[in-house]
Image (tube, rainbow, N blue to C red):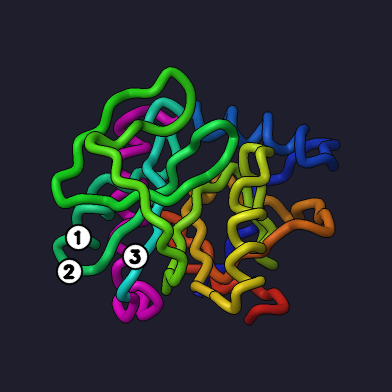
Amino acid sequence: MVVKTSFLLPMMNTKAQMRRELLSRRRSLSREAWSEKSDQICQRLITMSELLDADRVHCYVAMERDREAGTFELLEWLASERKAVFMPYIERSQMLVARYLPVQRFEAARVGPPVPVPLELTDEEHFDAVIVPLAGFDRRGGRIGFGKGWYDRFFDALSAKGIHPARIGLAFDCQEVPSVPSDPWDQRLDFVVTETGIIKCLNSRS
């Protein structure tokens, strides 16, 4: 098995610096490369027992313009497998939960992910798996997001209620770094799926 090395970030040791560089790398992908790599990620993801055995899955809606690993085909596959599918909805800087409906329509948002139409909010919390977008990651489950803390608060609230879904991040190989700077409130991932492999993260949750 070939072990890949992380892409080095020259003299960057803060999350903000790393985020800027990693997002620039991701956004530089052509649409064709983004689509191909996203499809490869999806094909790997749907082989995971954590997803195949899940009844309730929470999955982000990808922002193509930012080249987040694509999820539209994944959302439809989850629904076709008769799983209850949910997605995040941002309102007034708060991440709420919305149901994903089969053949869901979306409208472009001025800022943030596409808006589902119709929008059906729910108080569901008992997820078996949560699929998370990434700006960057390391192999210990460290995650760099957009810096808003939505998923940190989300996972912390679930854990406080004894709910511990599999935390699965989606990213491209170019988003891996040797080490993500850690803050006390950071919530780590269990897995990261890239176009070339499934990484089981080495963290305290493993």
**For residue 136, above or below residue 193:** above
First in sequence, mark 3 or 2: give its number.
3
User: In the structure shown, which secondary structural element does the residue marked by tag 1 occupy?
Assistant: helix
Would you name the residue on which mark 3 appears?
44
Q: Is residue 181 left or right of residue 3?
A: right
Give the CA distance from mark 3 to mark 2: 19 Å
First in sequence, mark 1 or 3: give its number.
3
- Residue toward you, 75 or 171: 75
Q: What type is the residue that disc 1 sits on?
A: Ala
Q: Residue at x 20, y 36 (%)?
A: 105
Would you name the residue on which mark 2 appears?
82
Q: What type is the residue that disc 3 sits on?
A: Arg
Question: Which contiguous range is marked in magenta?
Answer: 29-54
Secondary structure mainly formed by the magenta segment = helix
Q: CB atoms at circles 1 and 2 under 8 Å apart?
A: yes
Would you name the residue on which mark 1 appears?
79
Q: Residue at x 49, y 64 (%)?
A: 168
Q: Residue 141 placed where, x, y %?
A: 65, 64
